[in-house]
Image (spheres, grey):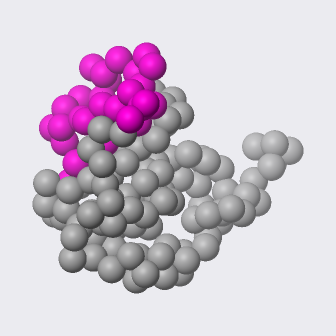
Amino acid sequence: MKLIAASAHVTCATGQNTVELANDANPFGLSLEGVERIDLNFPKFTDGRAFSQAFLLRRRLGFKGEIRATGDVLVDQLAQMERSGFDVAVLRADQNLEVAQRVLAAYPGYGVGKYQGDAVDIQPHFITAATV
């Protein structure tokens, strides 16, 4: 997962077809034609609706572009964001980028060679086509 400091975040990237989806919007009503990036907002850290939106976009709608977490994004949410389908997280201004990188590195079982499935790769690495 790519991490961005709040000060380095550009809302509308040049050359990208970006959609900002409100956290109460239904992803099924969104046309994904030509969309390269979807920004999902966490208005406060206790509001987790964007986790569900990311999961639905990846698993049910098959969105392959970038899903970016914005808003009240805390370091301790990053592992779950990655598992839910987020590619990029824009950290809240008071969150330390180095600490965030250490937190993500502490969960290697969710990366390459996963022990558990997630929104992107549903099967753990020890499940092969022969065992399914």
| Residue 51 in view here | no
Quarter of the figure that contains the C terminus:
top right
Residue 118 falls inside the magenta stretch: no
Q: Is residue 16 magenta?
A: yes
Relative placement, left or right, of 92 versus 63 is left
Q: Quadrant of residue 73?
A: bottom left
**Relative image position of residue 26 (x, y in whole percent):** 24, 29
Residue extending furthest toward the front: 14
> Is residue 63 shown to the viewer in this render?
yes
| Residue at image location 27% in from the left, 70% down from the top | 74
Left or right placement of residue 57 versus residue 29 in this view: right
Q: In percent of the image, x 24 and y 35: which residue is there?
A: 21
Q: Is residue 73 left or right of residue 68?
A: left
Compare residues 6 and 40 and report the one nearer the observer.
Answer: 6
Q: Quadrant of residue 130?
A: top right
Where residue 63 appears, x then y in whole percent? 48, 31
Provide residue 96's location: percent of width, then percent of height. Answer: 33, 80
The x, y position of residue 64, in whole percent, is: 53, 34
The number of callouts visible is: 0
Residue sitting farthest toward the right: 130
Q: Residue at x 41, y 43 (%)?
A: 67
Residue drawn 30% across and 48% down?
10
Tell me which segment is drawn in magenta: 14-42
